[in-house]
Amino acid sequence: MSNLDPALQQALTTYAAHDRILYGTDFDGVLAPLVLDPSTSSPIDGSVQALREVAASDGATVAIVSGRDLATLRHLSGIAEDEPIVLIGSHGAQPSIPLDTGEVWDDAAADRLHTVVDALEQVVAQHPGTRVERKAAGAALHTRGMDGDVANEAIAAAEDAARQLVGVHIIAGKNVLEIGVLDTNKGAALRALADHVGSQVICYLGDDRTDERAFEVLPASAGHVTIKVGAGDTVAAHRIHDSADVLAVIRQVASARDS
């Protein structure tokens, strides 16, 4: 017996009945519980296999969409390159298949990235315990595990530094602030993927502020299903509580596609 809200169960049933669907999910905080050391993140038991079952159904496309760089996302998720599941890293800047998101990497973007990394390294030097993660189209300042006041000071310093730069975009998340040099986001990436594969409707699960960009472009009135995982303000149409609910959602979609 599912513990999912009846309204969500009905929305998933209606969604899964379409001929061509796109099922998208964030990684950290959704497929993989948040942990102190991000390098040790791993999907909840059964979740990847359930995603594979959805992907194996005719007309279904599955995507894992993350702020992680593509190589790290592939390693942590365990999704092999020859599997049909699409991986989209760096908030949409690194899809595992060619997608037209309207953004182009060029010398100017490379120069902006170098400037962003330098700026964040200066923040790290002034706030011990923080760390910089360089990505394909940006860099992130991580504060997970730090004292709240110290973390907030570091994030504020990173935001101030970003505002001094031209052609960059601030992406705020849980215990992290990313500065991107391309105007990509999860919503644009999902819509581009749906256009690419011909999906009629999209279901997307996310837990972070970066996922709101996806929720915003997937209205329920068009048949899309948006699901916020955990607490916090959201524009998503539905909310679930934890990893057990995440697995229940995937399994319901897999079961509906198999029937």
Image (cartoon, rainbow, N blue to C red):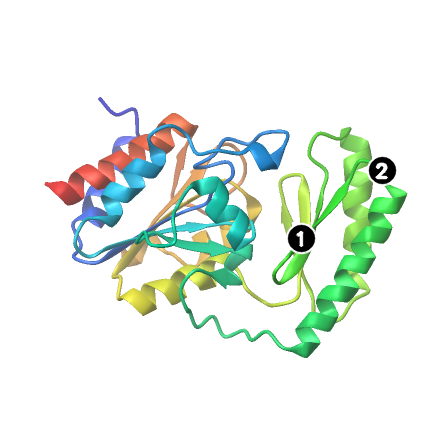
Q: Nearer the viewer, mark 1 or mark 2?
A: 2
Q: Residue at x 29, y 59 (%)?
A: 222
Q: Is residue 223 above or below residue 129?
A: below
State the residue in front, 190 or 48: 48
Q: Is residue 152 left or right of residue 214?
A: right
Q: Is residue 237 above or below residue 221?
A: above
Q: Is residue 5 left or right of residue 146?
A: left
Bin the neighbour count of mark 2 within 10 Å (Cα to Cα): few under 14, some 14-19, many 20 and up.
few
For label 1, the residue is 178
State the residue in front, 140 or 224: 140
Residue 242 horizontal/vertical position (percent): 43, 28
Image quarter in which the C terminus is found: top left
Residue 3 horizontal/vertical position (percent): 30, 24
Q: Give the number of callouts.
A: 2
For label 2, the residue is 128
Evaluate whether residue 11 shows in this view.
no
Q: Is residue 235 left or right of residue 14?
A: right
Using the numbered discs, state the Cα–Cα distance from disc 1 to disc 2 in whole angstroms.
18 Å
Evaluate whether residue 191 shows in this view.
yes
State the residue in front, 191 or 73: 73
Q: Is residue 87 left or right of residue 118?
A: left
Q: Residue at x 50, y 36 (%)?
A: 29
User: Of callouts 1 and 2, which one flags the residue occurring earlier in the amino acid sequence?
Assistant: 2
**The residue under label 1 is which amino acid type?**
Glu
Q: Residue at x 55, y 64 (%)?
A: 184
**The residue under label 2 is which amino acid type?**
Pro
